[in-house]
Amino acid sequence: MKAVVAERGQVTIPKPLREKLGIRPGTELEFIAKDGTLVARKARTDPVSQVFGCLGKRIDTDKFIRTLRGDTPK
């Protein structure tokens, strides 16, 4: 499969490859040059980094845990 590099350096990954490799919008890729070849692969991310900060900064963690557990306040 071939793709053309656009003026701004952008390349569209062919749909069959995106589907086969599970590349969706928001997927991070990393690029390296190896033996004169451009190699792209999914960036490795740890699970904690993916969810860090998703609850925001204004939440009472203890209250949130009690709600999840179904505990009633004492």
Image: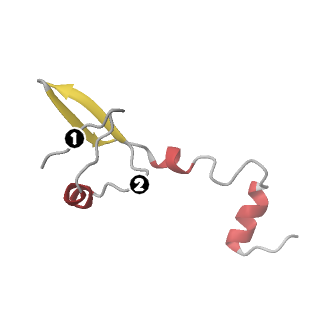
Q: Nearer the viewer, residue 56 or 62?
A: 56
Q: Earlier in the sequence, mark 1 or mark 2?
A: 1
Q: Is residue 45 left or right of residue 33?
A: right
Image coordinates for residue 46, horizontal then vertical, percent? 43, 44
Mark whose residue sits in front, 1 or 2: 1
Q: Quadrant of the C terminus?
A: bottom right
Please identify the quarter of the rendering in which residue 28 is found.
top left
Three-letter residue code for mark 2: Pro
Q: Nearer the viewer, residue 14 or 28?
A: 14
Please identify the quarter of the rendering in which residue 60 is found.
bottom right
Characterize the local packing of mark 1: few (<14), some (14-19) or many (20 or more) Cα atoms within 10 angstroms.
few
Image coordinates for residue 20, horizontal then vertical, percent? 21, 60
Residue drawn at x 67%, y 54% as measured from the top left = 55
Characterize the local packing of mark 2: few (<14), some (14-19) or many (20 or more) Cα atoms within 10 angstroms.
few
For mark 1, what is the residue? 4
Relative to 38, residue 56 above or below: below
Image colouring: secondary structure
Residue drawn at x 20%, y 55% as measured from the top left = 17
Three-letter residue code for mark 1: Val
Image coordinates for residue 59, horizontal then vertical, percent? 77, 54
> At numbered mark 1, what does the secondary structure look like: helix, strand or loop?
loop
Q: Is residue 44 left or right of residue 59?
A: left
Image coordinates for residue 18, horizontal then vertical, percent? 26, 56
For mark 2, what is the residue? 25
